[in-house]
Amino acid sequence: MEITQTTFPVFGLTWHEHSPDRTSILAYCGGGGSAKTGVHNSILVSHYAFGGELCMRLTIDTLEALCVHVSFGVTYLGHDGVVDVSQFPKEVVVLACVGKELRLYSAFEGRLLGKLECKDMINSAAMSCDGTLVAVACEGGMLYTYKLNGLPCNPPPPASSSSPNDEGGEEKKEEETAMEDKVVYAVTEFLPLAELKGHEKDVCSVAFRPTSHIGGKDDADTKYLLASSAKDGTCREWEATSGKCVAMMACTIPDSEKQQQPKKNARAAMLNKQVLVRGVAYSPCGNFLYTIASGRRGKAFLGKWQRVTETQKQQQKQLPPFLPWDNSCVSDVPVSAMSINKDGTVLALGNVEGEVLFIGVEDGNRIKSFSVHDLPVTCISARPANLQYTSLRSKGKKLVIDAVSVSADNKMSFITLQKERTTLFGFIRGLFKIIVLIAIMKYCFDECEEEIMSFDVGAAKHCLVGSPPGFVLEGPLH
């Protein structure tokens, strides 16, 4: 585990593996919140080369507005058919929740590509796998979905009135055609799709199903599914384009685990009974949902929900869209951050006591835990690529990083579950150290056998160390 210091309290973090150049991109956001604190509100985008060396860093100043959440997306900026997408690479973008605004930044240049404003404060945002849709989760229980539409940075010049017969007319026409061909769609507008109504309290997180759209012979049959979790104790799945709620899961906490409050403090008792679902994540195939729920105090529970198959629906028509699979306790205190790795095998959790936990998805058991932060973990990001393709590694040991966590204590931790493999050189070096140590012990035992066997510590020490040389004793004191 490696810990680095940040220049401001961090509230949001996201991690992306950029496969074309084998780099890891980390973006984190935070700050002092207002100008009075003297701490700037910023978004930092760091690019790491293979092995963990920092190769580029961008700083985006959000001025007096505090950014509370960031996430990555990969999209064609001109995916609407006007531009041949095969001729342009995908753009890695940063979705930033800044107050009531959702801003879209380039992860490689830091420039603003587009923004939208909502009625309420934005808590979280996500982009679909194909980079065409964006979902926004707000306070008050509302979610909104938008379609991204590319706009040209430099619109093509108006058509010239010169005719081919005019002097230089042919050359001008060729130049205009070349300019039109070079138009790159680099600014994005958000086209409203649907309002997702259902949650009764603030929405904490939102995530698109990894498989993105499901089935359908044409675009009209295509469905984009997303999941959201809120402070009303529920997790919901939606159709992103229509806004229809297709599933609702009520997360529960066993009664025996709820903290008992004094009867005179009725408000505290009521708040403690409230179930908060702070995180939601899909399995890689999209057939399982994972939720993390707790009260304001007490233990946190990991819920596992299985999607009902078509065969099950045919056998029993009254089945809900998701069936509860497991609900296991994973932390003695509330969990404040959650993320699942690319393999779908490990969940990385951060709790309010600054501890980072790794939970096995199959059995719900704790793999390992680390005491990292002095304050609650505000965000955590698990490894976004398969083990063999992950480029972010610890310095020196070259071990793959499995999760990155942040907190308001100005710390960022890089945590690995991997163990350093012993090489032939390392084995020989360790064996040589053992042989030297045995030789020294044997020499000491041969020289001071009587003193050692008599368990006389003073005599053994005098025998091993010996008296000072004569010139030291006879020499003048300085």
Image (tube, rainbow, N blue to C red):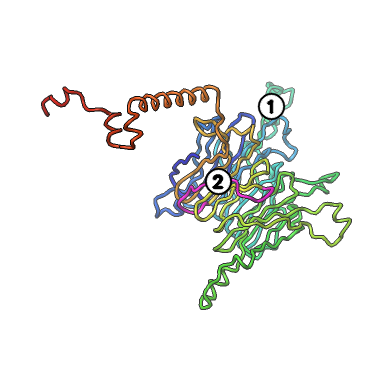
Give whichever of 202, 84 is nearer the camera. 202
Left-right relation of 470 to 382 = left
**Residue at figure coordinates x 53%, y 77% from the top left:** 263
The C terminus - image quarter: top left
- Looking at the picture, does residue 62 appear above or below residue 194? above
Query: Is residue 276 visible in the rendered structure shown here?
Result: yes
Magenta part of the protein: which range? Answer: 361-377
Amino acid of disc 2: Leu
Residue 178 — which label? 1
Query: The residue tagged with tag 2: helix, strand or loop?
Result: strand
- Relative image position of residue 255 (x, y in whole percent): 63, 68
Residue at the bottom extreme of this rendering:
264
**Residue at figure coordinates x 56%, y 30% from the top left:** 421
Crowd band around label 2 with a 10 angstrom C-alpha radius: few (<14), some (14–19), many (20+): many
The earlier-in-sequence mark between 2 and 1 is: 2
**Residue at figure coordinates x 84%, y 44% from the top left:** 218
- What distance separates the C-alpha of mark 2 from that of mark 1? 41 Å
- Looking at the picture, does residue 26 appear above or below residue 165? below
Residue underneath mark 2 = 13
